[in-house]
Amino acid sequence: MRTDAAAEIKERLTAAQVAELYGFPPGRGGFIRCPFHAGDDHGSLKLYPGSKGWHCFGCGAGGSVIDFVMRLFGISFRQAVVRIDIDFGLGLDLTGRRGAPAERSALMEARRLEAQEKADAEDRYREIAREYRYWWDCKKYFAPSFAAAASQLHPLYAEAIKRLPVLQYMLDQAEQRIGR
């Protein structure tokens, strides 16, 4: 079974829709009587809007719409996905086909290369950040005092003034590559 089928179920169905189909219509506040513990006379199970799922304040049970069906009928995850697909007529692809070995291999190689590129970009970012920090410190510690004349600038201060804007630009570019 494809895991994206479960994600699609969670995206397309709300906890209220699922509970109502199985005989538990929610009240105004989205509460129902919990079917998972005895003695719930006032409705302690909250059905959250959207894909946020449900939670019972009486017994502590909670989860997604799939967890609700699993617990309600005492079935496995796969069985719950199939049951929801059938009961709601979603028409999901539950075959679980994973593609040819060559396709999987190409996909795995692409993922490996992408991970390597990201790691290299992060390493480069750290290098630039380290150099930026060095020149920032030079600018800070070798800054001329008010009494000093402009001709008495420390060489490291002058170099820091030249390099910092370039390094800032390089840091910005590196951040975009690694997605910060």
Image (tube, helix red, strand yellow):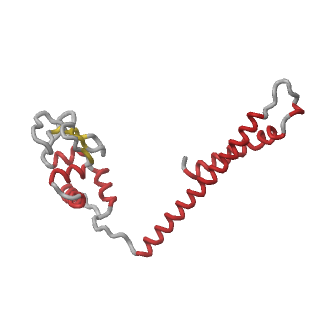
Could one spot residue 86 in this view of the protein? yes
Q: Residue furthest top?
A: 147
Residue 6 coordinates in the image, percent (x, y): 30, 56
Task: Quadrant for residue 161, please give it.
Answer: top right
**148 or 112, which is in the foreground?**
148
**89 or 65, which is in the foreground?**
65
User: Residue 123, relative to residue 49: is it above or below?
Assistant: below
Could one spot residue 89 in this view of the protein? no
Residue 59 coordinates in the image, percent (x, y): 19, 40
All told, the count of numbered labels is 0
Which quadrant does the N terminus fall into? Answer: bottom left
**118 or 137, which is in the foreground?**
137
Q: Residue furthest front?
A: 141
Q: Residue furthest right?
A: 151
| Residue 12 falls left or right of residue 27 | right
| Residue 26 falls left or right of residue 156 | left
Residue 22 coordinates in the image, percent (x, y): 14, 49
At 88% across and 28% down in the image, what residue appears? 149
At 13% across and 44% down in the image, what residue appears? 35
